[in-house]
Amino acid sequence: MRFCSKSSLKLTSCCMAMSLITTIMAASNGGSSEFDSIFQEDMLFFANDLSLSMPPNQPPSKSPSSAPTPICHDQKDFLARIGGVTIRCYSIQNEANRIKYCNLKRMNRTTRERQPIKYFCPEACAFDCSPTEAPSKSPSEPPTKSPTDVPTKFPTKVPSETPSQPPTNRPTDSPTKPPTGAPTEAPSQSPSEPPTKSPTDVPTKFPTKVPSETPSQPPTNRPTDSPTKPQTGEPTEAPSQSPSEPPTKSPTDVPTKFPTEVPSETPTNRPTGSPTNSPTESPSEMPSSSPTPLCHDIGTFAFSVGGISYRCDSIQTQVDIDQFCNLPRRYSGGPLLPIKYFCPEACEFDCAPTHSPSEYPTQNPSQDPSESPSEPTFICEALATKNYAEYEEKVKEIYRTVSGQNAFDGTDPDRMDALNFILDEGLCVDPPRMIQRYISALFYYSTEGETWEESVDWVSPKHECDWNGIECNDDLIITRINRDDNTLRGTLAFELCDLPLLNRLDLDSNQIGGSIPDDIGRCQNLVSYDLDSNNLTGSIPESIFNIQGLRSIDLDTNNLTGTLSRKFGNLVDLSYLSLFRNQFRGTIPVRMSLLKNLRKCSLLVLYT
């Protein structure tokens, strides 16, 4: 029991266990071979558990092999401790065990390397450990002494003593010594030094650095990088990648990929399909079919969503691309375009030149004229304008009457977006209709329509009466806006009262903030004002009591403050009033007793 001579608690336990085994062996029938096998397995278990090695039966090899020789039978003496459980090869009995154990690595006591368990238990792990018929992906060190039946995928670093059969499909990194006796069926990828004295049957993929003494048969399908000396008798089928010096006297059938430094004496038979990457020194006789697009993010471009400013470099994830890249925005007073046109790299937008005209105009005009001229004028008879500049100024003049003189000075993005929406579609109708469509678009932008839960047809080419949630009379004049429970944010535009026949505004259960517009009293046809369950602040404007026909006010569950005005008594047609869950103070005005038509009133829970 020399193995148990060290004194420690763990070793003492080990020795006690082995002593017990020895006693049992002595009591057995002389020690059967089966019992001996079990004893040896248990001894190896103790050795593995204590990270000790049993004395080897044979001396180790002087140098380890580069790759272990696989064993094609399970090792009876292998065991491993995994999660406090002892695992032997025969413990791996089903597919679940194979998935769980066979790729776990354990120490190979012979090579002192960690290997997957499947190398110790190939039968239990259903691991094919027989030698492969095909070569390994990388060469061995040193090379094999006899060739493989199939050539290696990559050449060996040292050539084999005898050639492989069949020959390799690709040449070695360096030429063989001595050279082959017969020429190869296909040319080498790189030319030999010096060139061959007789031509190959097939031309080389790349030209030789020194020309061959006799030409190859048949001729090459593509031109050489530099012109031959002397010149060829016939023109090539395709042009050279770089222009010759001087240019050819007769044109090629296909235009060159890059322009020549000196123009050809005669033009090519057909024009180029797309514009060149850089302009020619002198303009071409015919313009390109489409302008070259801008393929890089515009560093100075910025846009706002939900009151937060972003730039191209803010778009970093697929979620950002989905959220921002198709939102319409402007840059430097240009047309309204999706953000991906200003941030093509961030939006992963393919801005390569197309063979057909682009859907949207380029941000900067092309240097060459277009195939057909732009329309010289923009005539709008309804507004009495004769060109686009007059039209734009007239539209701004109309909208300043409802939004104020400073509405379009660049400080109010919502009103600028609504204006640009009208200008981009070139709406040409009478001023009342112009105002109605502008206010409809402004309502969308001021309540952050991009984030609405549902926004079918809004700010689309359809008539605003067809936008979901807008109701109109037979004359296509808006009478109701209904956007209940639709994640509206932002604030209410005071211009809503410039919709002359608006009688119902239903916007409850949203997240609208700000205050009730002070001039709400201009909505003289308003019958129902429903904005409960929002984030409104401030007090109820006094002007609301001038709306004589108002029948329903629903403002509960907001953050309204102040006191209730005695003017509530003026709303004699009021039948519904709900103001609870706000922060009002004071007392209920006595004049509210004049509201004879009131059927439901929720007030008292708000008073303190």
Image: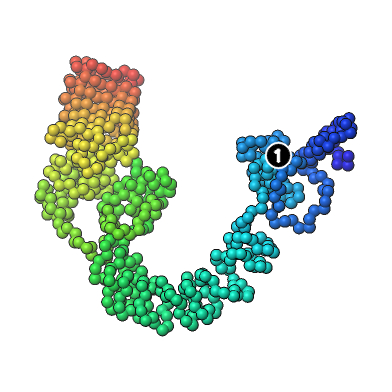
Residue 102 image position (x, y, % from top left): 65, 42
Q: Residue at x 24, y 71 (%)?
A: 285
Residue found 22% across the figure and 63% down from its top: 371
Q: Which amino acid is tagged 1?
A: Cys
Q: Is residue 556 left or right of residue 146?
A: left
Residue at the spot x=33%, y=66% of the render? 276
User: Residue 293: x and y, percent?
Assistant: 32, 59
Image quadrant occupied by the C terminus: top left
Task: Report helix, strand or loop for mark 1.
Answer: helix
Q: Please say if 412 is above or below 476.
A: below
Give the camera-side residue of 70 and 575: 70
Q: What residue sits right under mark 1 in the picture?
A: 89
Q: Position of residue 477 (x, y in %)?
A: 15, 35
User: In the figure, 170 relative to 605: above or below?
Assistant: below
Residue 151 as seen in the image, left or right of residue 106? left
Q: The N terminus appears in which quarter of the rendering?
A: top right
In the image, 575 versus 134, the foreground residue is 134
Residue appearing at x 27%, y 57% in the figure? 357
Residue closest to the far bottom: 230
Look at the picture and state if 215 lies above or below 301: below
Q: Is residue 172 above or below residue 545?
A: below
Toward which corner of the image does residue 377 lie, by quadrant?
bottom left
